[in-house]
């Protein structure tokens, strides 16, 4: 009995020593947007394979965190799923992909288009029933993104709203959560990444993308730049980044990762 | 005269109690059936040992299982001695109703109710940034240890308090020192409560997402040491179902593995607590 405790302790000590001895030759730390994180993770893995001895550690936590960590030096590269704000002009942003944001409703909802005023009225609580926009007599469930999400900022900016004006019934985080919320509620309306929504729709998830400003919400329209509600997925750096960081950014923007961008349902940069 | 069982109120009560127990079992069965239906097809040996591919949509969960177990091991290694010590102090050393003991108990009860995201932010600030451990399995495990401590201490303390006073007097009468009485008589008698607390703690730790995403992190590579970042199974499931498009099938399969792992670890914890502590009461 006693020897087994001793052995466990010895094993733990050995692990701790191993922890101290271990050190990667070159390590890149990326933190930030949870939207960019899966893509960055895959790009990082491919970069590691092509550059032996380099380790790429990706941590999520949100765009604001990415910007802050890049600025404070906690991360070599920050990830932000939005364009930089004027107050962040001291940083460099390199886009690695685009992402369109589209409004989604439940597939059983007969409403096929909403103009900008109707969207505004719905999100500010002025319209609370689908009957008012030509739908059935059903309460509208407004699904909004959580404070701090880049999609929220983009959506608010596009429709000229502030978050305090919005009367939401559900507040969500990531894209898939938004899609699951709308798919489970015939009266819901929300906004999510178009690539994700297209994929889920093809998988039979009962949602439908609404066009915006008369332009269909498709990945192709985002790629061509015609769709009005789109955002860049950025890698954020500060000052003059080192050679490894520059190499990684060039790699992440290159043709060699286009398949990874598509695999994550984002839109590759136009060439 | 009618017998008690046939009185309407009595019968209603019986039905209500059975229904409540049945409903609880049904919820678990439904959940399990849902998981098995959606995830069992993906389960295979290679799913358990392979590295994830395509952000987790394809491939397996090998490195994530290793990280999860390492995080748990760190958490238990840190929480068990601390928890046991505090529980023993509360139950055996602190004077009954003393102010210090009351305050410690209050602190523990408050800690037990603190949302896990708060532990996550605290762990990130203390272990990752201030102590410089960064995103690492060590940070994650220590954060979980803080989370698990209240449950562990309170249930162990209850177990110790339930040991009859006669046993302590008996041990004293035989000339056993306080420490010896504790080690040979009282702790073994409280072993079932300790293992129950341990199981609750492990359950909470294994299911943890919010406390780990900012401490042990997101990296899904096989960890080379405790200083490496490693993704826990619960974080992986959350990521696959909420963030990664098309990750649902693997999320279900991973959830199934998590539940199986929980059952196995709980069984082991119960067995070990019985072996280490419970048996001594007979042999010595």
Image (cartoon, coloured by chain):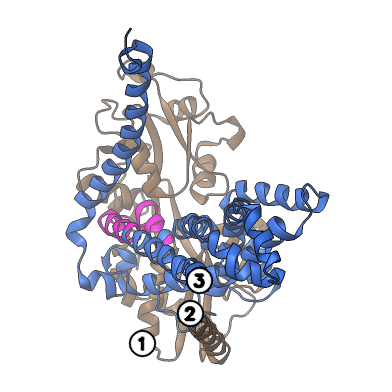
Left or right of residue A105: residue A153: right
Of B91 and A92, the residue lying toward us: B91
Q: Is residue B169 left or right of residue A35?
A: right
Residue nearest the viewer, comparing A37 with B276: B276
- Mark 2 neighbour density, 10 Å: few (under 14) some (14–19) many (20 or more): few
Q: Do dots 3 and 1 share one subunit?
A: no
Which numbered circle lies on residue A157?
A: none
Residue A268 in which image quadrant:
bottom left
Do tags 3 and 2 sit on the same chain? no
Compared to residue B202, the image places residue A201 above or below, namely above
In which quadrant of the rendered image does the N terminus of chain B lie? top left
Q: Secondary structure at mark 2?
A: loop
Q: Could you say whether the residue bearing mark 3 is in a helix, strand or loop?
A: helix
On the same chain, marks 1 and 2? The answer is yes
Provide the residue designation for mark 2.
A1
Where is residue A99? Give x, y as percent: 39, 55
Instruction: Tell me the mark number nearer the camera, choosing from 3 and 2.
Output: 3
Q: CA distance from mark 3 to mark 2?
A: 10 Å
Residue occupying the point 56% across, 35% down = A161
- A159 horizontally vs B3: left or right: right
User: Few, some or many C-alpha atoms within 10 Å of disc 1 (few <14, some 14-19, many ≥20)?
Assistant: few
**Prevalent SS, magenta region:** helix
The answer to whether mark 3 and mark 2 are in CB contact below 8 A is: yes
**Quarter of the image where one finds residue A96:** bottom left
Chain identity of mark 3: B
Which residue is labeled 3 in the image?
B280
Residue placed under numbered mark 1 in the picture:
A50
Q: State the extent of the magenta-drawn residues as a range.
A: B235-259
Chain with colour blue in the figure: B
């Amino acid at each position: 009995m006693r020897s087994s405790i001793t052995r466990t302790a010895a094993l733990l000590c050995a692990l701790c020593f191993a922890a101290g001895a271990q050190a990667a030759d070159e390590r890149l730390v990326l933190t930030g947007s949870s939207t960019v994180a899966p893509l960055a993770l895959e790009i990082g893995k491919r970069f590691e394979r092509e550059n032996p001895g380099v380790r790429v550690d990706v941590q999520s936590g949100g765009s604001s965190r990415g910007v802050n960590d890049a600025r404070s030096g906690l991360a070599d590269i920050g990830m932000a799923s939005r364009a930089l704000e004027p107050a962040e002009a001291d940083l460099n942003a390199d886009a690695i992909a685009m992402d369109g944001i589209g409004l989604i409703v439940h597939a059983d909802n007969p409403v096929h288009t909403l103009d900008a005023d109707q969207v505004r009225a719905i999100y500010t609580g002025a319209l609370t029933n689908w009957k008012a926009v030509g739908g059935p007599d059903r309460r509208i469930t407004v699904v909004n993104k959580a404070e701090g999400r880049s999609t929220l900022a983009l959506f608010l900016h596009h429709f000229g709203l502030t978050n305090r004006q919005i009367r939401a019934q559900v507040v969500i985080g990531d894209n898939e959560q938004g899609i699951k919320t709308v798919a489970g509620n015939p009266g819901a309306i929300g906004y999510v990444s178009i690539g994700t929504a297209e994929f889920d729709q093809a998988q039979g998830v009962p949602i439908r993308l609404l066009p915006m400003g008369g332009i269909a919400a498709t990945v192709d329209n985002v790629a061509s730049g015609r769709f009005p509600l789109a955002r860049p997925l950025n890698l954020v750096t500060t000052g003059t980044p080192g050679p490894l960081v520059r190499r990684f950014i060039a790699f992440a923007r290159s043709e060699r990762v286009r398949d990874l961008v598509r695999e994550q349902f984002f839109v590759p940069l136009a060439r | 005269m009618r017998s008690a069982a046939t009185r309407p109120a009595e019968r209603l009560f019986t039905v209500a109690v059975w229904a409540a127990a049945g409903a609880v079992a049904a919820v678990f069965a439904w959940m399990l059936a849902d998981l098995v239906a959606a995830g069992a097809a993906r389960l295979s040996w290679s799913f358990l040992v392979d590295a994830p591919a395509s952000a987790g949509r394809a491939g397996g969960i090998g490195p994530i299982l290793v990280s999860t177990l390492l995080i748990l091991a760190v958490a238990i290694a840190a929480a068990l001695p601390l928890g046991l010590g505090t529980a023993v102090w509360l139950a055996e050393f602190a004077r009954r109703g003393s102010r210090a003991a009351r305050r410690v108990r209050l602190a523990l009860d408050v800690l037990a109710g603190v949302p896990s995201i708060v532990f996550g932010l605290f762990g990130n600030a203390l272990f990752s940034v201030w102590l410089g451990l960064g995103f690492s399995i060590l940070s994650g495990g220590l954060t979980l240890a803080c989370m698990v401590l209240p449950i562990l201490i309170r249930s162990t303390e209850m177990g110790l308090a339930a040991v009859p006073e006669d046993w302590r007097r008996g041990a004293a009468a035989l000339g056993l020192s306080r420490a010896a009485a504790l080690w040979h008589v009282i702790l073994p008698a409280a072993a079932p409560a300790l293992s129950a607390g341990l199981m609750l703690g492990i359950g909470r730790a294994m299911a943890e997402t919010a406390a780990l995403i900012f401490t042990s992190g997101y990296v899904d590579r096989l960890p080379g040491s405790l200083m490496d970042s490693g993704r826990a199974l619960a974080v992986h499931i959350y990521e696959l179902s909420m963030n990664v498009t098309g990750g649902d099938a693997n999320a279900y399969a991973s959830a199934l593995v998590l539940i199986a792992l929980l059952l196995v670890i709980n069984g082991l914890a119960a067995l070990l607590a019985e072996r280490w502590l419970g048996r001594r009461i007979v042999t010595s």
